[in-house]
């Protein structure tokens, strides 16, 4: 909008002339500076809360919590009991021969599947 001259709209300028001029408080500058300091202090509080020392501490606590959750949730390695080793010691040598014969039988059966057989 172009600059308005007093002769363009006389009534408007008369009304504007009767309004009191805005007066600033004598403490205006002090209040502005206080607001600026308060905002800076707020920013510094947030920045201090996110400091490296606190982030390292929080991440260490989080790692300990995760480790405890994993340890309590998953059982430890299964230990062999003495009864398991006794079972292995009690196996008869003849059983090994039977297992070897079974392996040979399975191998023969797998090979014979591919041979041509008459269909029924």
Image (cartoon, rainbow, N blue to C red):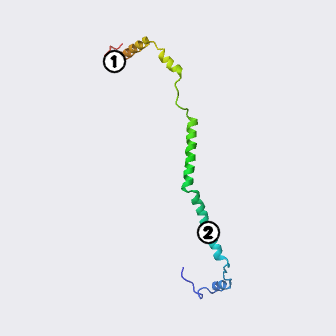
Most extreme residue toward the left, as rendered? 116
**Apparent side of residue 5 relative to residue 115 in the rendered image (left or right):** right
Closer to the camera, 58 or 34?
A: 58
Q: Position of residue 98 (x, y in %)?
A: 41, 12
Closer to the camera, 24 or 75?
A: 75
Q: Is residue 106 above or below residue 29?
A: above
Distance from label 1 to label 2 (Cα)?
89 Å
Give residue 33's quadrant in the image: bottom right
Q: Is residue 108 above or below residue 28?
A: above
- Secondary structure beneath disc 2? helix
**Which image quadrant: the C terminus?**
top left
Q: Position of residue 74 (x, y in %)?
A: 55, 34
Disc 2 target residue: 37
Most extreme residue toward the top, as rendered? 94
Disc 1 target residue: 111
**Apparent side of residue 11 relative to residue 89 in the rendered image (left or right):** right
Mark 1–mark 2 CB contact (< 8 Å)? no
Give residue 68's quadrant in the image: top right
Q: Position of residue 101 (x, y in %)?
A: 38, 13
Q: Position of residue 103 (x, y in %)?
A: 38, 16
**Which image quadrant: the N terminus?**
bottom right
- Secondary structure beneath disc 1? helix
């Amino acid at each position: 909008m172009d600059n308005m001259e007093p002769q363009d709209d006389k009534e408007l300028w008369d009304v504007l002339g009767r309004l009191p001029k805005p007066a600033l408080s004598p403490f205006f500058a002090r209040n502005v500076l206080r607001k600026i300091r308060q905002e800076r202090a707020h920013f510094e509080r947030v920045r201090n809360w996110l400091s490296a020392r606190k982030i390292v501490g929080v991440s260490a606590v989080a790692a300990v919590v995760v480790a405890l959750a994993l340890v309590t949730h998953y059982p430890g390695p299964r230990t062999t009991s003495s009864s398991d080793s006794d079972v292995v010691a009690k196996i008869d040598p003849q059983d090994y021969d039977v297992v070897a014969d079974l392996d040979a039988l399975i191998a023969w059966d797998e090979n014979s599947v591919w041979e041509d057989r008459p269909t029924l």
